[in-house]
Amino acid sequence: MKDNSDKVIYEKIIKYGELRNKKVLEIGCGDGRISSLLTAESDSLVAIDPDENAIDIAKKYIPNTEFRIGSGEKLHFTDNFFDVVIFTLSLHHQNSQKALDEAARIIKADGKILVIEPVIEGEIEQVFAFVHDENNEKRDAQNSIINSRLSVVDSEVFTAEWIFRDKEDLFQSVFQYYDMPFDSDIASKITCFLGDKSEANPIILLDTMTIQSLVE
C-alpha cells in the first residue's frame, strides 16, 4: 500500500497556515509524519501526542522539533503563546470541546487554529469504519467547532489517494492499521461495499478530508 495523504495534508496546512516566523503547535502528531514536513516551514514547532511510543520514535528520527507527550484537552502552555495551532486528524480522538477551548486559550490574538479532520463519506473512511467506527466522534468534533467561540474563516474539502496492489494488500493494510488479526466477516463487508472495485488491480480509494481555519 502507498498513499499521498501526508503530502496533501502538508500542502493544505502550508496553504492556510502561513507558518514562516511563527510559533506552531501540532496536536496529535503521532510518530511525526506531518511534523517532519512542517519542521522546515516553522522556526519553532512543538508537537504533542498522548502515545509515548510514538513520541519516542519522533524524537529519534526528526530534528528541529520539540516533541512532548500530551493531549489537546490540557495544554501546558501559557495564554496567548502560539501563532498557529494545528489539529492533524486528532480533534475527534479527544474531548473536542475541551481541546478547542484550550487551543483558543493558548493562541495569540491574531493567531489561527487549523483543524484537519476525516470526512465520514470518504471511501477509505468508510472502509475503516467497518473495522473501527469513529463516525460519532467525528460528528461530535464538527458540532464542537460549530458551538465553540471560534469562527470558521476558511474551509476546504480535499482528497488524497490510498493505492493497494490488490484486495489482499487492502485487507492486510487495513487490519495492520488497527493492529488486529484478519476478520473474514469484516473483509466480506468491505468487499460488498467496494463492489467491482474490490477486484481491481490496483485498488485506488479516495481519502476525503477537510481543513478548517478558525479564529476568535
Image (cartoon, grey):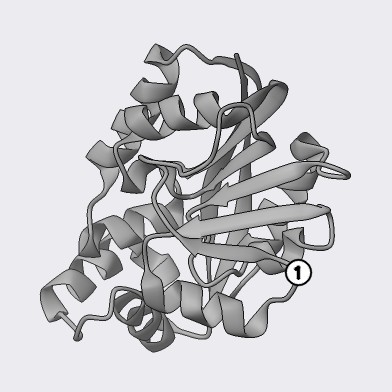
- Seen as rendered, the residue at the extreme left is 185
- Give the labeled residue for mark 1: 64
Q: Dot 1 surroundings within 10 Å: few (below 14), some, or many (20 or more)?
A: some
Q: How many marks?
A: 1
Residue 202 visible to the viewer: no
Residue situated in front as seen by the camera: 167 or 195? 167
x and y, in percent, of residue 19 in the image: 81, 43
Residue 58 visible to the viewer: yes
Q: Tell me: residue 8, above or below residue 79.
A: below
The reply, left or right, for residue 28 in relation to residue 112 is left
Location of residue 168 (image quadrant) = bottom left
Kindly identify the amino acid type of the residue bearing the numbered disc 1.
Asn
The reply, left or right, for residue 185 in relation to residue 152 is left
- Seen as rendered, the residue at the extreme front is 78
Q: Residue at x 36, y 23 (%)?
A: 144
Secondary structure beneath dot 1 equals loop
Q: Residue at x 44, y 54 (%)?
A: 123
Location of residue 112 (image quadrant) = top right
Q: Residue at x 35, y 85 (%)?
A: 172
x and y, in percent, of residue 37 in the image: 74, 64
